[in-house]
Image (cartoon, rainbow, N blue to C red):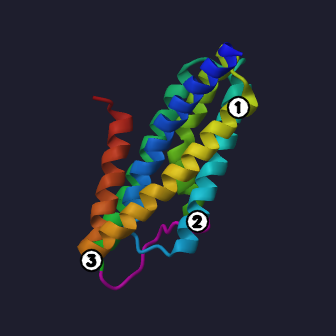
Amino acid sequence: MSAVLGELLTLLLMAFALGMDAFSVGLGMGMYQLRLRQIFKIGIMIGIFHIWMPLVGMIAGKFLSETFGTLATYLGGLLLIILGLQMIWSSLKKDEGSAIKPEGFGLLVFALSVSLDSLSVGLSLGIYGARMVMTILCFGIAATVLTWAGLLAGRKVQGWLGAYSEALGGSILLAFGIKLLFPF
């Protein structure tokens, strides 16, 4: 029983760490003038991605090397940089709306970008032999709750910053993407 409890504690800590990525990115995206319904949907979508990405990673972890995990981190960083630059660019343009919004295809890109690190962690956990159901539930629930918290906090900050909030949100996404590409 203590081995299961130890594994659960380890998975919860990992889920919290991965969810903090979603919180940080959600903080930036929350400055995008989102409604509560959109925040709910974004949190659910990111939670779903944080379930199936480590699931795919765990299944593939038995067959693939660690270089794929590094590739996923770089791809996630590039996607965040693109989203960040797009938000900054659209905040500078007064006449047009944003090209990538956290709905439809934009939401899929956003959810994918913040959950790619879960794929690489899933690869490692698949090699390790972690309990699959416990892992994906911990990751999904933590990511959903922390995404909601980040989006709601970003929404409050957006009210304080007004027109500059989208540029700040894009800057946060850009910085986080650079951090993924160049860890320091």
Give the residue displayed 57% in from the left and 68% down from the top.
Answer: 103
Farthest-out residue, front = 1
Question: For the N terminus, which image quadrant?
Answer: top right
Query: What secondary structure is the magenta-colored segment mainly?
Result: loop
Dot 2 crowding, Cα within 10 Å, few <14, some 14–19, many 20+? some
Alpha carbon distance from label 3 to label 2: 22 Å
Residue 55 x/y as whole percent: 71, 34
Residue at horizontal 58 percent and vertical 65 percent from the top: 40
> Badge 1 is on which residue?
134
Disc nearer the start of the sequence (3/1): 1
- Residue placed under numbered mark 3 in the picture: 162
Residue 58 position by quadrant? top right
Q: Which residues are magenta?
A: 94-105
Labels 3 & 2 near each other (Cβ < 8 A): no
Where 166 falls versus 80 (above or below)? Answer: below
Q: Residues within 10 Å of mark 1 (few under 14, many from 20)?
A: some
Q: Work out whether residue 79 or residue 130 is closer to the camera in this orientation and state it.
A: 130
Q: Residue at x 33, y 61 (%)?
A: 169
The front one of 136 and 28 is 136
Whether residue 35 is visible to the viewer of this picture, yes or no, is: yes
